[in-house]
């Protein structure tokens, strides 16, 4: 496993992106079905895609490029990158699910694209493809669970 | 407000340089340090007494403090490091990758050598100048050979150097960070390299997955305090024999290790806490026990006998500094774990990435190189050819309202900042709607802009140019005052056209509702969104003033005095008129349900009713609601109620939903779609009564079924608001009867919109209201314009699903046939009805791509007999060609 603080210059920075892929078993038919309700957002390096506190409930799935997740730390609230989301990763799932404001800043680390689906658009998708919607939500729950485990590990101090 | 962005753990390439030192300074330092060490080697042989005291008792005891405070300085100036880096510097290093065993055990070899050599001081090096000299020269040679063979610092400094484990233990939170000046460029030779990232190297070591790797570091840390203590307590030679010294040193180190292992097993704290405590324990023990001798040695060199207070002062200061070090070291662990616990990242397998990428690209079609950029958010989306700006924004969850989706209501104005030529051109209806909105040149309605190329769109309508009022022709001087009753779309359209046709007359707009014109089609949203009326208003606040229209909101018209030509208001005022336009609209039909009117029964036609419903749901914490009526409004309301967490049952009187627009198969698909959204539909279900104590608890159906519900929302139709007209003696049936010029039985009074009944029809549709409002205004000013009902095309968005229905929806007569392609199995549905081969009707559900072609062909009753087989096979692209060629 690689460590982001030791991404030596000669290494390929892509190696620092660990694996946690949304809906890895989906094929073309499934993604095509989702795409009927979704948009494709294009972003450029340095662009802030999501700002903490924003009211925006759409979900993003990175299809190309990489996005950093930044959260404020310490008294000065300096933003630090706590995650990198690369191709196949899902972003924005918290606001998508809990209807609250955005919990972190997302900044593009590379140029890229992401599939974006709003809550209402997802409802339509669910109406037309309930079985796919179930898979979608189940996998989203799985990813949240993985993140929850990581958070638990952080709290218990045994990472 | 953006918080400053910082990296709390910068690597040496990112470190800010505080002192503008020229690079050669370091080389000078290294030459000096190597010279000093070689000087020691000579001195130790030539004058061993002086050399030994100077080397072991004066200089070496200072090193732990240097490792603790400014380790980077030592890493750059260490003479052994200089020897190690010389081959690389002069370009003769083989720079091999170290073998696996070296990577695995280099650190262990280093600390084993440290323990052995440091213990050996007690019987060898402390008293033997030659041995020490040989030790120094051997180390220099070994460091050089290591640098000659292996790449970077992996041959000595970051592997087997015996002092390296000590440095790593003490250097976790330096007082001063000094960047690495050896490695240019970094060759990535060492895992978790201290020289690369000094602040977190040790933490990274402890967080490795390989427990052996972690174990070596932990073992060394735990052994150190006991070892240091042993160094001062175990007697030197010749009191003890070398073997005894080594044995007792090992016992001390082992006892310390055991204590720490026991503590770690018993106390629930991260490993890092124990290793850092061991580090500071060892360091403080070293100076607690060793400082008196060092100060004494210093005294003999300088001749100054320092008082004991100085010693205590130094030891106290070190203790304080150690506490600071501990706090800083512990403090950063949480952040480090947070920042490396980032397994949220992902690297998808190449095939999965390709599938995902292909899907997103194929969805965007041929125009994938194009972008639609939305301001003020600055979000860019890949332009999906054929999709409207509205659809693109909706799919992305951007804040945009929608209404009729036909360019007539004006719920979705946007401003084109760039690329207007890449959007589908503007039609007459859209132009008229934008004029009503008071929006000029660069404004468009999102639903009417199909994307053909890149464009930049602002969702903030205030970016639009103001519209230039049309040149007004002089109006009929005999008309001085026109009163419009009703502030819905019919009334507002009428008022606007009145002003266009007559620049001078007074125009009064009297409205019972307290709101300026709003998007009535969007009121279901008021039930589940927290924005209240925000976004629903369809006019800027200055609209009335700019047109010199006097608006009377929240004002009830009491009576029309046709003889005196006066409208009397409930406020006691009265307004004289020369012409009167009735646009009082309709109310939700109160169904003949026994008990309707009880708390918990609602109709939904006005914004206030939607807001009252939302308030009721919250006040009573309801869970179950029933919606009577499976029409468009009922279904939108059901969806809204579902969104706010209610269990919803829709009661549909007929055999399937939307019976006027859909056939049985389409209705069933719609039912399944709604069921998937969590909305149940009961067909052949008509409410007979509501029952409950103080409020609704259940709905009883005509066939005796009982539906538990705390709310019954009736959406069974509209009731034109005809009371005023009826009391004034105008001819009324369900609505106010009008002719094709929208004239009532009184030639000075016109009616339009939901309140008007033309040809026995009350369509209750937004586009009809717009058209009738325009015609009523024109004729009120003396014009001669007739209303022609348009082809009955219904384009609905039922809870986000496009439903288009036109003409005949089922084949029934002689020579009629239905064309039903195989089902796509995803809730979509399409069907054409032909009569003698000509298109006379169609149903499209979720097939927006065919809508415009089918409606164009159906208006022309086009002959489709030649493409019958293609259509049956589902290849409906042929319709696009037909529509284009014929058009």
Image (cartoon, coloured by chain):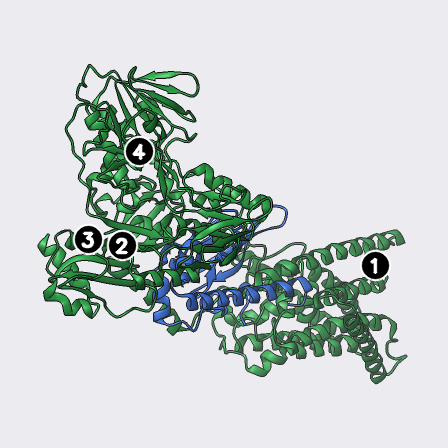
Chain colours: A blue, B green
Q: Are marks 4 and 2 in contact (CB under 8 Å)?
A: no
Q: Earlier in the sequence, mark 4 or mark 1?
A: 1
Residue B800, horizontal then vertical, whole percent = 36, 54
Q: Are marks 1 and 2 in contact (CB under 8 Å)?
A: no
Report crowding for label 1: few under 14, some 14 to 19, many 20 or more residues within 10 A (C-alpha).
Answer: many
Mark 4 or 2, which is nearer the eye?
A: 2
Which residue was labeled with disc 1? B295
* Residue B757 location, quadrant: top left
- Which residue is the site of mark 3? B855
Q: Chain of mark 1?
A: B
Q: Earlier in the sequence, mark 1 or mark 2?
A: 1
Determine contact: label 2, label 3, CB under 8 Å.
yes
The label nearer to you, 4 versus 3, is 3
Label 3 chain ID: B
Q: CA distance from mark 4 to mark 3?
A: 28 Å
| Nearest to viewer (mark 1 / mark 2) | 2
Q: Which mark is residue B437?
A: 4
The percent position of residue B373, horizontal first and vertical second, equals 33, 48
Q: Quadrant of residue B579?
A: top left
Disc 1 to disc 2, C-alpha distance: 96 Å
User: Between residues B423 and A12, which one lies in front from this camera angle?
Assistant: B423
Q: Is residue A45 visible?
A: yes
The tag on residue B804 is: 2
């Amino acid at each position: 496993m690689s460590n982001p603080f030791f991404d030596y210059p000669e290494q390929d920075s892509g190696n620092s992106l660990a694996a946690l892929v949304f809906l890895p078993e989906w094929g073309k038919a499934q993604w095509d079905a989702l795409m009927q309700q979704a948009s494709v957002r294009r972003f450029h390096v340095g662009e802030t895609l999501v700002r903490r506190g924003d009211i925006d409930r759409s979900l993003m799935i990175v299809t190309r490029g990489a996005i950093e997740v930044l959260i404020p730390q310490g008294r000065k609230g300096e933003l630090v990158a706590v995650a990198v989301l690369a191709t196949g990763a899902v972003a924005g799932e918290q606001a998508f699910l809990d209807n609250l404001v955005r919990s972190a800043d997302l900044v593009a680390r590379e140029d890229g694209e992401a599939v974006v689906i709003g809550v209402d658009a997802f409802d339509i998708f669910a109406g037309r493809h309930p079985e796919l919607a179930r898979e979608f939500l189940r996998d989203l729950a799985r990813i949240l669970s993985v993140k929850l485990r990581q958070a638990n590990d952080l709290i218990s101090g045994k990472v | 407000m953006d918080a400053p962005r910082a990296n709390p753990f910068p690597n040496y390439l990112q470190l800010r340089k505080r002192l503008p030192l020229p690079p050669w300074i370091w080389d000078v330092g290294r030459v000096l340090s190597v010279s000093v060490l070689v000087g020691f080697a000579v001195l130790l042989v030539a004058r061993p007494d002086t050399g030994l005291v100077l080397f072991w008792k004066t200089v070496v005891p200072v090193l732990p403090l240097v490792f603790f405070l400014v380790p980077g300085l030592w890493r750059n100036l260490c003479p052994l490091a200089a020897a190690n880096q010389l081959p690389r510097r002069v370009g003769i290093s083989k720079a091999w990758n170290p073998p696996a065993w070296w990577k695995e055990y280099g650190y262990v070899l280093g600390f084993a050598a440290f323990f052995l050599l440091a213990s050996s001081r007690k019987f060898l090096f402390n008293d033997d100048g030659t041995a020490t000299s040989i030790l120094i020269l051997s180390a220099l040679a070994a460091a050089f050979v290591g640098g000659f063979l292996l790449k970077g610092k992996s041959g000595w400094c970051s592997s087997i150097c015996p002092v390296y484990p000590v440095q790593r233990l003490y250097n976790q939170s330096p007082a001063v960070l000094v960047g690495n000046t050896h490695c240019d460029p970094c060759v990535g030779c060492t895992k978790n390299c201290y020289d690369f990232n000094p602040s977190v190297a040790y933490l990274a070591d402890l967080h490795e997955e390989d427990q052996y790797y972690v174990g070596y570091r932990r073992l060394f840390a735990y052994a150190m305090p006991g070892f240091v203590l042993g160094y001062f307590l175990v007697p030197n030679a010749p009191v003890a024999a070398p073997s005894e010294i080594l044995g007792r040193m090992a016992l001390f180190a082992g006892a310390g290790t055991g204590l720490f292992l026991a503590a770690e097993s018993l106390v629930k704290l991260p490993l890092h806490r124990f290793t850092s405590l061991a580090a500071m324990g060892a360091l403080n023990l070293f100076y607690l026990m060793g400082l008196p001798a060092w100060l004494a040695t210093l005294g003999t060199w300088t001749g100054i006998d320092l008082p004991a207070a100085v010693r205590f002062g130094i030891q106290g200061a070190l203790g304080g500094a150690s506490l600071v070090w501990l706090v800083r070291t512990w403090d950063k662990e949480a952040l480090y774990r947070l920042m490396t616990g980032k397994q949220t990242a992902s690297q998808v397998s190449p095939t999965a990435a390709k599938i995902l990428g292909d899907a997103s690209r194929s969805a965007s079609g041929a125009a994938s190189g194009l972008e639609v950029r939305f301001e003020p958010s600055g979000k860019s989306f890949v332009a999906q050819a054929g999709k409207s700006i509205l659809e693109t924004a909706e799919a992305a969850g951007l804040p945009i309202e929608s209404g009729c989706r036909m360019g007539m209501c004006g719920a979705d104005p946007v401003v084109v900042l760039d690329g207007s030529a890449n959007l589908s051109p503007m039609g007459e209806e859209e132009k008229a709607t934008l004029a009503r909105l008071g929006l000029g040149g660069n404004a468009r309605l999102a639903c009417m802009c199909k994307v053909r190329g890149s464009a930049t769109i602002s969702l903030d309508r205030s970016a639009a140019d103001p519209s230039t009022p049309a040149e007004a022709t002089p109006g009929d001087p005999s008309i001085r005052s026109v009163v419009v009753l009703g502030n819905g779309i019919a009334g507002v359209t009428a008022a606007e056209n009145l002003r266009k046709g007559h620049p001078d007359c007074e125009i009064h707009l009297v409205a019972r509702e307290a709101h300026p014109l709003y998007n009535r089609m969007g009121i279901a949203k008021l039930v589940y969104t927290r924005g209240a009326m925000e976004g629903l208003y369809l006019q800027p606040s200055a609209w009335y003033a700019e047109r010199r229209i006097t608006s009377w909101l929240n004002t009830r018209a009491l009576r029309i005095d046709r003889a005196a030509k006066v409208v009397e208001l409930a406020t006691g005022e009265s307004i004289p008129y020369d012409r009167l336009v009735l646009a009082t609209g309709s109310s939700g039909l109160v169904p003949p349900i026994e008990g309707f009117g009880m708390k918990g029964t609602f109709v939904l036609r006005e914004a206030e009713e939607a807001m009252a419903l939302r308030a009721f749901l919250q006040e009573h914490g309801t869970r179950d609601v029933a919606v009577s009526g499976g029409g468009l409004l009922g279904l939108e309301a059901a969806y809204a109620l579902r969104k706010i967490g209610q269990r919803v049952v829709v009661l549909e009187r007929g055999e399937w939903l939307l019976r006027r627009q859909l056939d049985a198969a389409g209705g069933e698909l719609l039912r399944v779609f709604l069921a998937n959204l969590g909305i149940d539909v009961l067909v052949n279900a008509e409410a007979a009564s509501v029952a409950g104590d103080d409020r609704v608890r259940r709905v009883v159906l005509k066939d005796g079924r009982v539906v538990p519900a705390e709310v019954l929302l009736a959406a069974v139709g509209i009731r034109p608001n005809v009371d005023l007209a009826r009391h004034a003696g105008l001819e009324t049936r369900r609505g106010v009867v009008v002719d094709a010029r929208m004239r009532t039985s009184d030639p000075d009074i016109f009616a339009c919109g939901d309140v008007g009944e033309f040809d026995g029809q009350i369509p209750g549709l937004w586009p009809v209201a717009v058209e009738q409002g325009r015609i009523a205004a024109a004729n009120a000013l003396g014009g001669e314009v007739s209303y022609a009902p348009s082809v009955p095309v219904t384009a609905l968005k039922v809870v986000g699903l496009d439903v288009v229905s036109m003409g005949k929806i089922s084949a029934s007569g002689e020579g009629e046939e239905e064309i039903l392609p195989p089902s796509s199995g995803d809730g979509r549905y399409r069907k054409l009805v032909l009569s003698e081969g000509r298109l006379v009707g169609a149903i499209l559900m979720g097939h927006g791509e065919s809508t415009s072609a089918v409606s164009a062909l159906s208006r022309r009753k086009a002959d489709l007999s030649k493409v019958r087989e293609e259509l049956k096979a589902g290849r409906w692209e042929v319709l696009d060609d037909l529509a284009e060629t014929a058009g």
